[in-house]
Image (cartoon, rainbow, N blue to C red):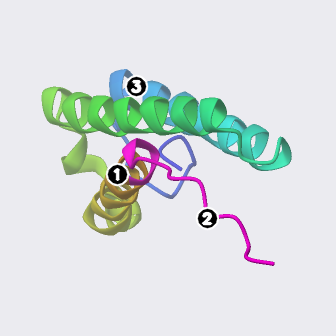
Amino acid sequence: MFLAAGAVYPGMPAQFAYPAAFGDLLEAALAMAAILAGMPRSLVWTFNVVGTVDLLAAIALATIYGAPDFMGPAYWIPAFWVPALLVTHYLTFLLLTRNQESPAPAAG
């Protein structure tokens, strides 16, 4: 999104836009791999760690390079989606670290 003409104002810092775009692409590929593989814990962990690091890196790079001044129509990504995704990653970490007790055997 941050590389699309018209989605952001001219002058968007490449030091933010390219890592954000390629991080999102990597994250989408990991999500699809995890879904298509039947959601094995190892792939979900990988997806969740990489996704969290990607979001935190994007926040840091946007701040360092002044990207908010160029967000333009894409302002809704950091305003809405980034906080929502951070909460989603946090909840996924909670589920991944929860002790999985095996269900009781069926009576019968």
The answer to which of 53 and 94 lies nearer the viewer is: 94
| Residue depicted at 56% across the width and 49% down the height | 5
Q: Residues within 10 Å of mark 2 (few under 14, many from 20)?
A: few
**Of label 3 and label 1, which has the lower sequence position?**
3
Element type at mark 1: helix
- Amino acid type at circle 1 is Leu
Labelled disc at residue 94:
1
The answer to which of 97 and 54 lies nearer the viewer is: 97
| Residue depicted at 20% across the width and 28% down the height | 65
- Amino acid type at circle 3 is Ala
Percent position of residue 92, x then y: 43, 52
Element type at mark 3: helix
Percent position of residue 41, x then y: 62, 37
Which residue is disc 3 drawn over? 14
Using the rendered image of the protein, determine whether residue 89 is visible from the camera's viewpoint: yes
Q: Is residue 106 left or right of residue 53?
A: right
Residue 30 is covered by the magenta coloring: no
Which residue is disc 2 drawn over? 104
| Dots 3, 1 in contact, CB < 8 A | no
Locate the C terminus and report the quarter of the image it occupies. Answer: bottom right
Using the rendered image of the protein, determine whether residue 25 is visible from the camera's viewpoint: no
Q: Where are the magenta residues, as a range?
A: 95-108
| Disc 2/disc 3 C-alpha distance (Å) | 55 Å
